[in-house]
Image (cartoon, rainbow, N blue to C red):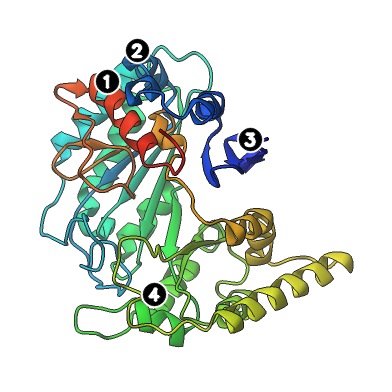
Amino acid sequence: KMVNIELNKGKHTYCSDCNVIINSELVEHFNSCVSRKKIPMQHAEIAAETFRSKVTEINQISFETTQECTLNCTYCVNGGTYKNQRSFSKNYMEIETAKKAVDYMYSLLKERESNRVLAISFYGGEPLLNFPLVQELTHYASQVFHGWNVMFFITTNLTVLTDSIIDFLARNNFNVHVSLDGPKEVHDRQRVFRNGKGSFDTVMRNLKRIEDAEPEFYTSIGFVCVYSRDQSMKAVYDFFTTDERVGKNMVRFNSVDSRGTTYYDNREIDKQTRRQEYDEIIGNIKTKTENNEKLKPIEEHIMSRYQGMEESLSLRACSTMAGTCLFNSKIYLDVHGTFHLCEKMNNKFPLGDPWNGLNFDRMEKMTGLFLSQIPGFP
């Protein structure tokens, strides 16, 4: 009998027989299809009309402000080691394109009576290279969605910074996520400028500028740590628990995706050492918890993911289905004005554009395509 385990507060479900994680809204249909085995693929699609209703639940619009970046990180999905991903370019989003997208999304969401919350996120490349767009769109979206709780997010490598940028981000209560992979010896192996020089010193210097100028705002800044399995997990953990400048701030881990890339081809991974480090870190956190000691933000993050991390370590495969794959949590606009599922999706699956609207018939066909990639699904 198939055993289903709820994950992520019930949003996703682990289906043991097929050893995959799928969106919980698909579980009943998934189980039915697996049991019959030979159901035609078109029966696995979700009707276009369903998506017309679901897009009204979108709560995040992400903008690719530019495809240019100041860095050339070794693991970057746009750096040439991943198949089917775009490369860096000098393309910048035009403000009229961004405004048109805000107008179109408002036309879809304006009738929503409850949950009038919207996140506007800026990505790149390095989004601060197109700071004028960030400024103007922030003001414009606030006007269009007047009366809503509009929150602003930006993910930055923090190599581009001015006093005016600091002032603007602080005044508009931005949620700033800074890419920082750990101590200098780890960060500088991976996050490098075009000339090969590490960016750690620049990031730390700019963090100090923000802290000196806006100390209260600085406490809200979070860090995104991309972990590569050939690096020391303990070195990263020690840095985020002991460094005075970063140790009090939120930290979120992402792992370098090993699928469809040559990144790990020439890298030695000591799996035994990595597992020992992981067990030691978990042991330290558990001991602190038992002794009622206050956990650092990175420790709280690790513990919040502990169950999921343990389950992931035991899985043979996971599907890519998530909330965004049902087109109802967020949507992403690239520099050219094309909508996509999210910033992590390649550009092979466009959903439409702000001028002609979303293509719901295409969404229906795409869902069937995604489902067909799940092991055990017909």
Instruction: Determine the CA span between mark 2 and mark 3.
Output: 24 Å
The front one of 369 and 84 is 369
Residue 46 at x, y = what percent? Answer: 38, 21
Query: Closer to us: mark 2 or mark 4?
Result: 2
Question: Dot 4: within a 10 Å radius of its alpha carbon, few (fewer than 14), some, or many (20 or more) residues?
Answer: some
Query: Closer to us: mark 4 or mark 1?
Result: 1
- Please name the residue that numbered disc 2 is placed on: 49
Q: Earlier in the sequence, mark 2 or mark 3?
A: 3
Q: Is residue 64 left or right of residue 317?
A: left
Instruction: Determine the CA span between mark 4 and mark 3.
Output: 37 Å
**Quarter occupied by the N terminus:** top right
Residue 257 at x, y = what percent? Answer: 40, 62
Instruction: Determine the CA span between mark 1 and mark 3.
Output: 26 Å
Question: Dot 2: within a 10 Å radius of its alpha carbon, few (fewer than 14), some, or many (20 or more) residues?
Answer: few
- Please name the residue that numbered disc 1 is placed on: 360
Disc 1 is placed on an element classified as helix
Instruction: Name the amino acid, label 2.
Output: Glu
Task: From this view, report whether residue 131 is shown above or below residue 378.
Answer: below
Q: Earlier in the sequence, mark 2 or mark 1?
A: 2
Is disc 2 in contact with disc 1, using a CB cutoff of under 8 Å? yes
